[in-house]
Image: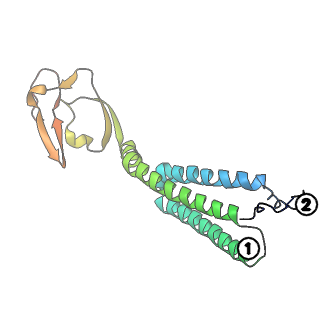
């Protein structure tokens, strides 16, 4: 295995071993390869999770598709660089491969996280936010048909729940319902 056998007079000198040349590190390339996937994830997660997706979903999906095309372009660059290196030309494409893989992982992660956040949190919030706000609602004066577009209501100070008339309502889930009344007089409808 390359060691001197017993009885042989093998002496190594300092010129027998030549270390391979060190690869230089491109600090700008390293910073770019670490920051770009993070920025891609943060921007895509924002666009997919919040207002831009709710207000203009087609533009949002177009931006996401453009990012995917750019990432696939990075994949082509890594592939071309790898072929050139295999042919004996150019540097090893390590950073191109890393940048492609990390950007693709960031894109997939942002798409999954942003879509889940949008569907479970943002859509219900923006749906209620787009409805009307009614203040000083007196149940004795205003009927339910007048408030069908209400997202939030503030009742008059003398309004209260009539717990004697509670019941369950089922629409996929089961809800506990009770009428809101004002004053002491029984209401005509609930």
Report the residue marked by disc 2: 15
Q: Quadrant of the C terminus?
A: top left
How is the protein colored in the picture? rainbow
Taking depth in this image into account, of 174 and 97 the one nearest to the observer is: 97
Above or below: residue 17 compared with residue 76: above
Percent from the top left, x then y, of residue 77? 68, 71
Q: Which mark is residue 85?
A: 1
Residue 85, picture quadrant: bottom right
Q: Is residue 62 left or right of residue 161?
A: right
SS of the residue at dot 2?
Answer: loop
Percent from the top left, x then y, of residue 63? 56, 61
Q: Is residue 54 visible?
A: no
SS of the residue at dot 1?
Answer: helix
Percent from the top left, x then y, of residue 136? 30, 28
Mark 2 or mark 1: name the one nearer the start of the chain.
2
Which residue extends farthest bottom?
87
The 10 Å Cα crowd at callout 2, few under 14, some 14 to 19, many 20 or more, is: few
Taking depth in this image into account, of 73 and 148 the one nearest to the observer is: 73
Percent from the top left, x then y, of residue 39? 62, 51
Look at discs 2 and 1 and give the one toward the viewer: 2
The 10 Å Cα crowd at callout 1, few under 14, some 14 to 19, many 20 or more, is: some
**Could you tell me if the residues under marks 2 and 1 are in contact, i.e. CB atoms within 8 Å?**
no
Q: Is residue 19 visible?
A: yes
Q: Which mark is residue 105?
A: none
* Disc 2 to disc 1, C-alpha distance: 30 Å
Residue occupying the point 77% across, 76% down: 88
Above or below: residue 84 compared with residue 35: below
Above or below: residue 53 compared with residue 147: below
Residue occupying the point 78% across, 55% down: 25
Residue 163, picture quadrant: top left
Residue occupying the point 81% across, 57% down: 24
Residue occupying the point 54% across, 58% down: 105
């Amino acid at each position: 295995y390359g060691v001197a056998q017993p009885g042989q007079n093998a002496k190594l000198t300092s010129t027998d071993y030549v270390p391979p040349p060190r690869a230089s590190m491109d600090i700008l390339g390293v910073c770019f390869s670490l920051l770009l996937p993070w920025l891609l994830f943060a921007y895509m997660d924002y666009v997919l999770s919040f207002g831009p997706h709710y207000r203009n979903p087609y533009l949002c999906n177009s931006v996401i598709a453009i990012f995917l095309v750019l990432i696939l372009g990075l994949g082509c660059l890594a592939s071309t660089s790898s072929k050139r290196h295999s042919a004996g030309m150019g540097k090893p494409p390590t950073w191109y491969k890393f940048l492609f893989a990390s950007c693709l992982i960031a894109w997939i992660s942002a798409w999954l996280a942003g879509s889940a956040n949008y569907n479970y949190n943002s859509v219900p919030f923006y749906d209620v936010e787009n409805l009307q706000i009614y203040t000083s609602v007196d149940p004795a004066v205003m009927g339910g048909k007048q408030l069908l577009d209400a997202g939030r209501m503030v009742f008059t100070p003398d309004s209260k729940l009539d717990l004697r008339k509670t019941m369950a309502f089922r629409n996929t889930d089961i809800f506990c319902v009770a009428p809101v009344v004002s004053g002491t007089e029984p209401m005509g409808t609930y």
